[in-house]
Image (cartoon, helix red, strand yellow):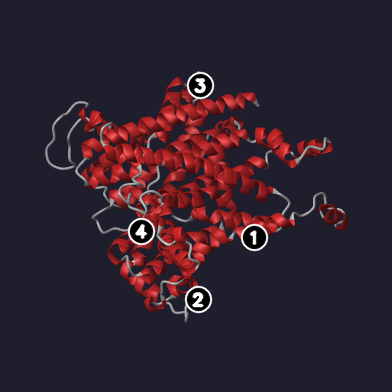
Amino acid sequence: MKKKRKMSKKQKTYLFIIIPVVLLFFMFNTWPMLNGFFYSFTNYKGYGSYEMVGFQNYIDLFSDTRVLKSYLFTFKYAICGTILVNVLSLLMALALNAKIRCKSALRGIYFVPNILGGLIIGYIFSYIFTYIIPAIGQTWNIEWLQNSILSSPAYAWIGVLIVGVWQAVAMTTIIYISGLQTVPGDVYEASRIDGSSKWTEFWKITFPLIIPFVSINLVLTTKNFMMVFDQILSLTGGGPAQSTDSISYLIYNNGLDGGQFGFQSANAFIFFLVIVIFSIVQQNITSKKEEQL
Amino acid sequence: MEKAIRKSVKKPKEKTNWVLTIILILGTFTVFFPLYMAINIAFKQPSEMTNSIEGALGLPSSINFSNFAEAMRVTDFWHSLGNSLFITLATIALALVVYSLAGYVLGRTIAKHKGFKWVYLYLISGMFVPFAILMMPLVKETAMLHLGNQFGVILLYLVFYMPMNVMLYAGYMKNIPTVIEEASEVDGASTWTTFWRVIFPMMKPMHATVAVLTALGTWNDVMTPLVIMSGTGINTLPIAQLNFQTQFGTNYNLAFASYIMSLIPILLFYIICQKQIISGVANGAVKG
C-alpha cells in the first residue's frame, strides 16, 4: 500500500512537469496551425475584415501559375540537391575516412560551411556570381561565364543550388563518416583476402552496412532543401521572373506582405501535407531497408 | 608505384594515401575561397574595387579597420550581437531544462502508460510541421500576446526544437538504469530532487548535443526573428545584415566587413568546441 501511494506521488510530479510542456507546445505549434487552417478558408488579407470562402483558395491554388511554378522550382531544387549532396558527401566521407594525413584538421575545415548562416553565405556567393565569375569569363573570353548566373531566369536556380549544396555537404559528410566508422575493420580484411576490388568492396560491403545512414541523410537533406528560404532571400529574392520562388519564400512574401494571408494559408497547408506524405513514404522505405539488414 | 610505396614504408597496417591527402587539401580551396574573398574585400576601399579579377581578388593596398568601424556603427553591431547572444543563450538554458525534464518523464513512462505515449507522439509529430505554415498565424498571435520581441522568439525556438530534442532525451533515458533512481528514492529523496541531483548530471552527453544543435539553429536563424520582430527595431545579427543589405546594398566593402564580423563569433565558438560541435551534430542526426 505504501508503495502505491509513492507511485501516485511520482505520477503527480510527472504530470506537473509534462502538462506545462504540452500547453506550451499546443499554444505555439498546434494552435497557430489550426488558426492557419481556419484562415485558409477565408479571403483574409492580413488586415481588415474577411469572409468565409469555403474551398475557393484550394481550388485557386491549382490554377495559380506562381504557386505551381514555386512547387516546380522547389521539387526540382530538392531532388537535384538531395542527389548531389548525397553523392558528394559519400565520396567526401570515404576520402576523409581513408588513411590520410591531417585527418582531423581536414574534417574540421570541411565542416565549416555548416556552421555559417545561410543568409551571409548567400550574400558572399551572390557577390561571387555577380562580379567574380563574370570577371573571369571576360578575362579568358568564356562567353557563358560573362553574365551572372543569378540574372538568368533559366539558370538562376543552379546558382542557388550550388550554394545550397556547398553548405549541406558539410553536415551530410559528418553523418556518413559516423556511419563508416560503425563498419568493423575485419570485414574488409576478409574481402581483401578474397581479392575483391575497391569498387566491389564498396558496393558489396560498405554500402549495405551504412544504408541506415543513407536513409537518414536522404530524409534530412530532402527536408532541408524543400524548406529553402535563407538562400533565396539573400541570392535572388525569388527572381528573376519568379524562377527561384521557393514555397516557403512565396508564403512569406505574399502571405505577410502581399495581402494573401488566406490564400497563402491554404498553400501552407498543402505544403504541410506534402511534407507529411513525403516523410511517411521515406520512413516506410527506411524501415523496410533496415529489416533487410 | 603503389607497391613501391608499400615496400618503402616498413610496418604500418595501411599506407598513407598521399594522393587522396593532396586532393583533399586542394579541395579545401572551395571552403576557403569565399571566406578569403569576403575578408579581402572587407579590408579594401571602394576605390580599390575594379571590375577585373585583380580588383576583386588582389590583396588590399593597406590593412585598416575603418570599414569595420563604420559597419559597426551603421548596423548597430553591439546591440545586434547582444540580442543574438541573449536569444541564443537563453534558448539553450531553457532548452536543457525543459527538454531534459520532458524527456525524462516520457522516457520513463511511454512504455507503461498509454496517456504518456500519446503525449510523446503528439510532441514528436511537431517535427513534420514546417515553419511556413505557422508563420502567418504566429505573427498575429505573438503580436496579440505582446511577444513580438526577443522573449517571443525564445519561446518559439523552445517550441520548434522541442520534438527533436525531447525525442533525443527520451531515447537517452534508456541508458540510465531505473535502479539508480530507485536507490535515491529509497533514501527518501523526492522525484524532483532525484532528477536534479542524479538524472540531470547523468544526461551530460545529451546536454552537449542539444546545446550545440540549439546554438547553431538559433544563432543562424533568419526566418523567426524576421517575421516575429519585424518593425520593432530589435535586430539579431543576421537581421542586421538583411537590413544593411536593403539600405546600403551597393557598398560592398562595408557589407563584407559587416558579414565578417557577424561570422566571427560562431567561428570562434567552432574553433574552441570543434569536437563537441561535430559529434553533437552527428549524434543529433543519427539518434534523431
Element on which disc 1 rests: helix
The residue nearer to you, when weighing B213 against B6, is B6
* Chain bearing mark 4: B
Image position of A71 (left or right of A167): left
Disc nearer the start of the sequence (1/4): 1
Dots 2 and 1 on the same chain: yes
Q: In this figure, which residue is indicated by the disc labeled 1?
A: B25
| Residue B271 visible in the shown view | no
Residues at circles 4 and 3 in contact by the CB criterion of under 8 Å: no
Q: How far apart are marks 3 and 1 (CA)?
A: 53 Å
Q: Mark 1 lies on which chain?
A: B
Question: Which residue is denoted by mark 3 in the rendering?
Answer: B112
Marks 4/3 same chain: yes
Marks 3, 1 in one chain: yes
- Residue placed at 50% from the left, 49% from the top? A165
Closest to the camera, between mark 2 and mark 3, is 2
- Tag nearer the camera, 4 or 2: 2
Comparing labels 3 and 1, the label whose residue is closer to the camera: 1
**Amino acid type for the residue under numbered disc 4:** Asn
Q: How far apart are marks 2 and 1 (CA)?
A: 22 Å
Q: Of the numbered discs in the image, which one, if any, rests on residue B59?
A: 2
N-terminal-most mark, 2 or 3? 2
Mark positioned earlier in the residue sequence (3 or 1): 1
Amino acid type indicated by mark 1: Ile
Label 4: how many Cα within 10 Å (few below 14, some 14–19, many 20+)? some
Mark 2: secondary structure: loop
Q: In which quarter of the image is residue B26?
A: bottom right
